[in-house]
Amino acid sequence: MLIFAPKMRFSRLQCHQGTALMAQHILLNNYKEMEFELIAKTFMGLEPILAQELTELGANDIQIGRRMVSFKGDKELMYRANFQLRTAIRILKPIIHFKARSADDVYNEVLKVDWTKYLDNNKTFAVDSVVFSEEFRHSKFVAYKVKDAIVDQFRESTGTRPNISVTNPDLRLHIHIADEDGTLSLDSSGESLHRRGYRQESVEAPLNEVLAAGMILMTGWKGDCDFIDPMCGSGTLLIEAALIAQNMSPGVFRKGYAFEKWPDFDEELFDMIYNDDSKEREFNHHIYGYDIDMKCVNTARLNVRAAGLASVITVAQADINDFTQPAEKSIMVTNPPYGERISTPDLLGTYRIIGEKLKHAFTGNEAWILSYREECFEQIGLRPSIKIPVYNGSLECEFRKYTIFEGKLKEFRSDGGVVKTEEEKAAMAEKHRFKKNRDFKQRIEEESENEDGDIRSFTFHHHKLESFQRKEEKEDRRNGFRGERDDRRGDRRDRGERGDRFSDRKFGRGDGGKRGFKGDDDKRGPRKDFDRKSFDRKSFDRKQFGKKPFNKKKDRRFDDED
């Protein structure tokens, strides 16, 4: 059943003025009753951007937390949050909040839930867990207690139990415990939302799609000028910029969501959301990506074609040394190497060249640079307008804006030029916004242990718990779950996908494109591009779109960013 927003309902009311207010009051009350609590998870530093996205989406009671934003909405808003939010990793729907002082508390509280509303013996489930508690030393132990409560409830009432599925469960649960506060939620997203579905191939350590979108939204760019990334890697910033410029939903390429397997899934409502392109807009400028590495160039082109965005994105090979002044007004957003995960010869020299090219070949424009090392920023040699702290994985990075102008600063200001807005001045006054919370770095390291925290790879160390695990695995094998052997195989699969978790990829300096660089274009000629204009969403099978049209090696990436 479609649930319309109050304004849509009001426009349909045909009543006298005397009864209109009463009708509105009734509709608003009904609307509020249909709302429920939701949580959107994100990266550290992107919370304000995510909150702004939720505001534009029409969410209510928005509260910013650490790596998350809570809000209220109805089923339609939950679907839209998964489909349209650019900076959310996953959308959770809390079932219960409780005090978790012991393992028995967890078990008993989960046991109170009527799981027949969500599961039956023919369905499968999985449990993810993130725990920060003195009482619980291992998140996977908490996941096992949740699983125990669910299967015991079914075994007691029906004599049988639902099974576990690690790869494709019918229901995915998420439990979060901070100190004594526990929250058990339904995971409405399933696979992490950073997996847009357009990436066909990757390079070493590519930029995460959610972080890339957040960086672009921080700049305020909405497609009002050309966009340049002189070190584009696999093209993530380029594609996310094209989606933002045309206001295309990032979920349009994705195969599916976890909520599509829920008993109350409204297929008609979600199809309406998926097929609604009324808010998309024309993009009258262009996006340019360059890289010195031809492998990166080919990978970026492959991903751009898969997204059907070749008409607005040009990718070519070029060296940053050959960068020249763009003919049109442009914004530059780029993520140079940090020297952390990838060995880069003459790292500081690379940043020195970036600074020289910005000063002498990018005047009149803005440049935004994400990096980790202060000594790298120092080599740029320019004063930033603003420094925005953001975490790229466990690295405490900064995203800096540079306003590039000719001549001296005093002359630029006397001519009416603005280097820092009042908002930027206020933000810069908040010194050491992240560094004063050094305890978070320890929490990040703990979360890296928790992020695969479900029953896939649980191993007890205490001798009593080892005995308990063997008993559980024996029972699971009898019920169709192969136990630790499959868990180990799952671990190997997860480790094989770690290559693309975060950004800091191989350094590239562009390639001979039409703007911003000089040099020869690629001589191979373009492949036939996917024509998105002729793409009919209404007759389009979303389930088939995610199948890769190219026989390339599997993308190396993380399952999630909890």
Image (cartoon, rainbow, N blue to C red):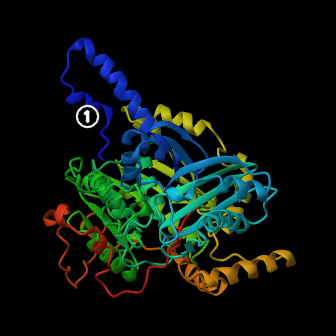
Q: Which kind of residue does numbered mark 1 sit on?
A: Met
Residue 393 image offset from top left, x and y in percent? 59, 63
Location of the C terminus (image quadrant): bottom right
Looking at this view, is 49 or 119 the one in front? 119
Q: Nearer the viewer, residue 413 or 540?
A: 540
User: Seen in the image, is 37 located left or right of residue 29?
Assistant: right
When the figure is inspected, residue 387 is found, relative to residue 301, above or below; the finding is: above
Judge whether residue 383 can be spotted in this image.
Answer: no
Taking the view exactly as shown, the residue that stands out farthest to the top is 18
Residue at 39% across / 34% down in the picture? 31
Q: Pinpoint residue 455: horizontal percent, then vertical percent.
A: 64, 72
Image: 497 above or below 193:
below
Residue occupying the far left of the picture: 534
Q: Position of residue 452 (x, y in %)?
A: 62, 70
Relative to 180, 358 lies left or right: left
Q: Position of residue 394 (x, y in %)?
A: 64, 62
- Residue 76 drawn above or below residue 89: above
The answer to whether residue 22 is above or below residue 308 is: above
Residue 96 shows in the view: yes
Q: Residues within 10 Å of mark 1 (few under 14, many from 20)?
A: few
Please report the residue visible at 32 percent of the width from the left and 78 percent of the height from the top.
547
Residue in front for this viewpoint, 184 or 554: 184
Residue tagged 1: 8
- The residue under the point 41% across, 36% down is 418
| Residue depicted at x 44% and y 48% | 218
Element class at badge 1: helix
Numbered-mark total: 1
